Every structure is written in structure tokens, then in C-alpha cells.
Amino acid sequence: MECAKVEFLKKGFQATQLKDIVTAAKVTTGAIYRHFKDKEALFFALIEDVYHYTLDFLDNAEPYDKVGIREAIERDSVEASYVQAMTYVNYMYEHLEEFQLLLKCSKGSRVENFIEEITIQYTKQNALFVKAAYEAGYAKCLPNDIEIHILTHGYITALCECILHDVPYEKAEDYVKNIIKFQHYGWYGVLGLPLK
């Protein structure tokens, strides 16, 4: 697995061949096939934990009632959003090589559209919030589904840029603060919510 990780990080999923991994690991091709169906299964085994962690991290969408949306808006702040974002960014840096594989080396694999996949999931959360805020009279504007998707995609991509551009962790914290401010005030502007 370690040799596979090195090969995938060096060449990417598409360019890496099983023979490269076999040679580096000093094992037979049969040894790999005893554990993994194919190259795709081996690659996925390397990123599976971070892949599922991400989907689980985003899987907390609930419909809001009027009390729930009021509470959500009252506790919403740049600071609260920053803490939530840094929880995930810290996890990315703690599992840096796995996220490099997932975000930089996965072209040609079944997870090459990972950012889009998590955007779709996170868009559902944002859409529930937006709709509830509008229906409760807090938001003055109601963006359509594609607008919510595009804005969400921009946010997810911005966080992933830390890994995509090899931003050192010590600089990532400031970068994320700026992204959160941009997103927070941007969403409030789009929705017509009073700034706080």
C-alpha cells in the first residue's frame, strides 16, 4: 500500500501501472490481485477513509422550522463558520497524502469528480437553509438551485485549493479566514440578510 501510494502520488492514477507498484513493492502481480480486484480498488483503498469522512462530515442536512431557522441565523457568524471549516481543513492536513491523492492524483478514477460530488451534497444543506430563511422572512432574495450550487462549488473548491496548491498549514489558517469572510458576507448579500 505504501509503495502504491508513492507511485500514485508521483504519477497520478491514470499513468501509474500495476507493474510499477509490483516492482516497487517487490511482490508479484498475483499478490496484489489477492487483495485488490484491480488498480481502481487499490487506489480507493488508499483514500477510502478520507472519502467517507468527508461525506459523513457533510451529511447533517435537516429541514428547518421557523424556530430552527431563527436559531441558525442567530448563531451564524464568521467565527462559527471558521471553526467548522478549520475542523475539516485540519483533518485534510492530518491526512495530507490521502487528500493529495484524492484531489490531485485521481483523474481517471471513480473519485476524480470528488469536489463535484461533495458540492452536490453540501448544496442540499445550503438549499434547505436558504429556503427556510426566505420562507421565514429573514432572507429577502431566493437564489435558484443552480445559483446555490455554483456558490457552494466555489466554497468547496476554495477550501480544497489549500491542498491543490500545496499551501503550508501555517498559511492555510489565514487563507481559510479570508475565504470564510468572503463566503459569509457574500451569502448575506445574495440573500439580502442584514449583515452582522
Image (tube, rainbow, N blue to C red):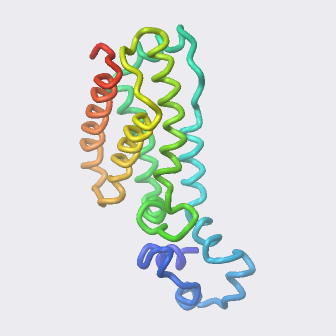
Residue 60, percent from left and from top:
58, 32
Residue at the spot 45% in from the left edge and 16% down from the top edge: 133
Query: Which quadrant, please, contains the N terminus?
Result: bottom right
Residue at the spot 35% in from the left edge and 21% down from the top edge: 191
Task: Give the vertical position of 55 relative to 126 (above or below).
Answer: below
Give the quarter of the image for residue 138: top left
Residue at the spot 29% in from the left edge and 39% down from the top edge: 179
**Left or right: residue 165 compared with residue 13:** left
Residue 106, percent from left and from top:
49, 67
Q: How many marks?
A: 0
User: Which residue of the protein is positioned furthest toward the right in this rendering?
Assistant: 34
**Left or right: residue 75 compared with residue 24:** left
Residue 110, percent from left and from top:
58, 64
Residue 41, percent from left and from top:
65, 70
**Left or right: residue 53 compared with residue 38:** left
Task: Give the vertical position of 100 relative to 115 (above or below).
Answer: below
Give the quarter of the image for residue 184: top left
- 191 or 161: nearer the viewer: 191
Query: Which quadrant, please, contains the C terminus?
Result: top left
- 131 or 35: nearer the viewer: 131
Task: Give the vertical position of 176 relative to 115 (above or below).
Answer: above
